[in-house]
């Protein structure tokens, strides 16, 4: 895809799920991918998949809840690839509980993993992006950040925060040809949804106009588009990949 080939993409949460799919699609499109997550073994497996497809990547152990690991990781990526053109902030967790029972540590952990790292990662890559006067930042939110969901006050707050943060950053960086956009996935087939009962999956699918859960490939395709030259006039937007679940 134009504007992806030869670019360097940093993907957080790249060891599994949506992050892994994004890494594979970006590599297939010709990007060099810096794979970042906590599990080094899983990252190496993704790197092996990319190599088998003829792509180029390297694994960087990074806990996005640790600011120093993010800064060290970005430094190592720049030393390896000389630049960072694309940032995909994808890492995230859930700690679901009704508000009356939600513990403060569950609130803090979700905000510290889903929202704060987007700020730290963006800040860490801004210097090289500003210097080259180009860049693509793609932050992964959720349909829950748009609609809310009972039992997910912490998760919804973190994902809604991603949207507001991204819009503000898009205004700051537009003059330097750096775009900032959001992908808001709906219910996607991942390990988390596989843990749901068959009845729950059917019930959820019945609420989706397209009649099925999304796939990680659906989200990855949208990410690859926003990372490309074809999306150069798109910034500050939320691209919903939800099968019509929220319109």
Image: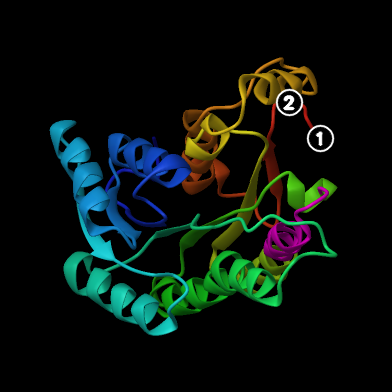
In the foreground, 21 or 114 = 114
Q: Is residue 245 left or right of residue 5?
A: right
Q: Does the magenta-highlighted stretch encompass residue 116?
A: no
Give percent across and percent down for residue 26. Answer: 36, 41
Q: Is residue 211 left or right of residue 147?
A: left
The circle drawn on residue 204 is 2
Q: Residue at x 75, y 54 (%)?
A: 152
Cβ–Cβ under 8 Å for marks 2 and 1: no
Above or below, 90 against 122 in this view is: above
Crowding around mark 2 (Cα neighbors within 10 Å: few <14, some 14 to 19, many 20+) is: some
Q: Is residue 2 left or right of residue 223?
A: left
Question: Residue tagged by mark 1?
Answer: 246
Secondary structure mainly formed by the magenta segment: helix
Under circle 2, the secondary element is helix
In the foreground, 68 or 4 = 68
Mark 2 vs mark 1: in front? 2
Quick one: which residue is furthest to the top in this view? 211
Above or below, 17 against 155 in this view is: above
């Amino acid at each position: 895809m134009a504007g992806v080939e030869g670019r360097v993409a940093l993907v957080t949460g790249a060891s599994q799920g949506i992050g892994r799919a994004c890494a594979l699609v970006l590599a297939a499109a010709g990007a060099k991918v810096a794979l970042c997550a906590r599990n080094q073994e899983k990252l190496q497996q993704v790197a092996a998949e990319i190599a088998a497809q003829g792509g180029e990547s390297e694994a960087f152990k990074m806990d996005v809840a640790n600011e120093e690991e993010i800064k060290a990781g970005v430094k190592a990526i720049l030393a390896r690839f000389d630049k960072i053109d694309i940032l995909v902030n994808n890492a995230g967790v859930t700690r679901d509980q009704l508000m009356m029972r939600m513990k403060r540590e569950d609130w803090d952990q979700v905000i510290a993993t889903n929202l704060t790292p987007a700020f730290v990662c963006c800040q860490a890559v801004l210097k090289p992006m500003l210097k080259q006067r180009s860049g693509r930042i793609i932050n992964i939110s959720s349909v829950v950040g748009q609609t809310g969901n009972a039992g997910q006050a912490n998760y919804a707050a973190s994902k809604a925060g991603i949207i507001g943060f991204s819009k503000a950053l898009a205004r700051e960086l537009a003059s330097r040809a750096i775009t900032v956009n959001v992908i808001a996935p709906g219910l996607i087939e991942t390990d988390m949804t596989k843990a749901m009962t068959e009845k729950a999956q059917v019930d959820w699918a019945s609420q989706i106009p397209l009649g099925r859960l999304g796939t990680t490939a659906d989200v990855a395709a949208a990410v690859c588009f926003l990372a490309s030259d074809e999306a150069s006039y798109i910034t500050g937007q939320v691209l919903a990949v939800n099968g019509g679940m929220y319109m």
